[in-house]
């Protein structure tokens, strides 16, 4: 056999050894990074409800339902990974502007290949809409422009608009400032059945 053939055999063997080492190194770092990711704490909590839904609780306690079929997979590790990824995405995109938050989460689901077919706008959406409408009614009854109310309360005009549209989740301090200016009072009333 000519000497060149030995060279090619050695080169092929060497390339296989190098490739195997590189693959093993890549798996080592991938496993290490995956373990690090899975151990990273999140403030949101995700759980599989049934075959078709995943529920996520955000740091402020709001619940979101995601249409997802991750329950069909047999791998417990894969399910845990996807649930943690969902929690991570919710944490990264968490905002008081719920409409913007939901849009960013859906975009991140697509970018990270999270198996989902959509999600709702949260279990507090109807309350946000009801409160926003009431603020607008009170403001209009006083014949006050939105920008004037925003100026008097120290709220950004765009945020006040989002509050009135039910797209922005606001705290008690902002609501109480709005109530003072509108000569209304903040009252805790039972839900209507």
Image: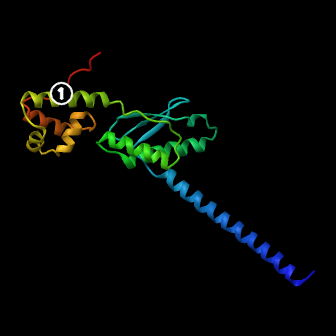
Q: Is residue 171 above or below residue 38?
A: above
Query: Percent from the top left, x then y, of residue 191?
Result: 26, 20
Residue at x 10% of width, y 39% of height: 149
Task: Work out which residue is located at the far top of the displayed protein and give it.
Answer: 193
Q: Which quarter of the image is occupied by the N terminus?
A: bottom right
Q: Which residue is mark 1?
A: 134
Q: Is residue 7 above or below residue 38?
A: below
Query: Percent from the top left, x then y, of residue 43?
Result: 39, 45
Front residue of 61 and 162: 162
In the drawing, does residue 75 fall left or right of residue 59? right
In the drawing, does residue 26 fall left or right of residue 6? left
Residue at x 6% of width, y 31% of height: 143
The image quarter containing residue 21 is bottom right
Residue at x 8% of width, y 32% of height: 182
Q: Residues within 10 Å of mark 1 (few under 14, many from 20)?
A: few
The image quarter containing residue 162 is top left
Q: Can you see residue 18? A: yes
């Amino acid at each position: 056999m000519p000497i060149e053939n030995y060279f090619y055999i050695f080169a092929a063997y060497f390339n296989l050894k190098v490739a195997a080492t590189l693959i093993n190194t890549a798996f080592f770092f991938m496993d290490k990074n995956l373990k690090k990711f899975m151990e990273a704490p999140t403030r949101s909590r995700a759980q599989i409800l049934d075959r078709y839904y995943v529920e996520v609780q955000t740091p402020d306690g709001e619940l979101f339902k995601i249409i997802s079929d991750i329950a069909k997979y047999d791998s417990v590790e894969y399910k845990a990974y996807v649930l943690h990824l969902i929690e991570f995405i919710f944490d990264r995109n968490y905002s008081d502007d719920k409409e913007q938050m939901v849009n960013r989460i859906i975009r991140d689901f697509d970018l990270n290949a999270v198996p989902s077919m959509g999600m709702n706008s949260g279990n507090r959406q109807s309350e946000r809409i009801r409160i926003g409408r009431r603020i607008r009614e009170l403001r209009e009854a006083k014949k006050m422009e939105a920008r004037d109310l925003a100026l008097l309360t120290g709220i950004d005009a765009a945020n006040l608009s989002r509050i009135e549209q039910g797209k922005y989740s606001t705290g008690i301090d902002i609501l109480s400032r709005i109530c003072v200016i509108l000569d209304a009072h903040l009252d805790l009333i039972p839900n209507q059945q």
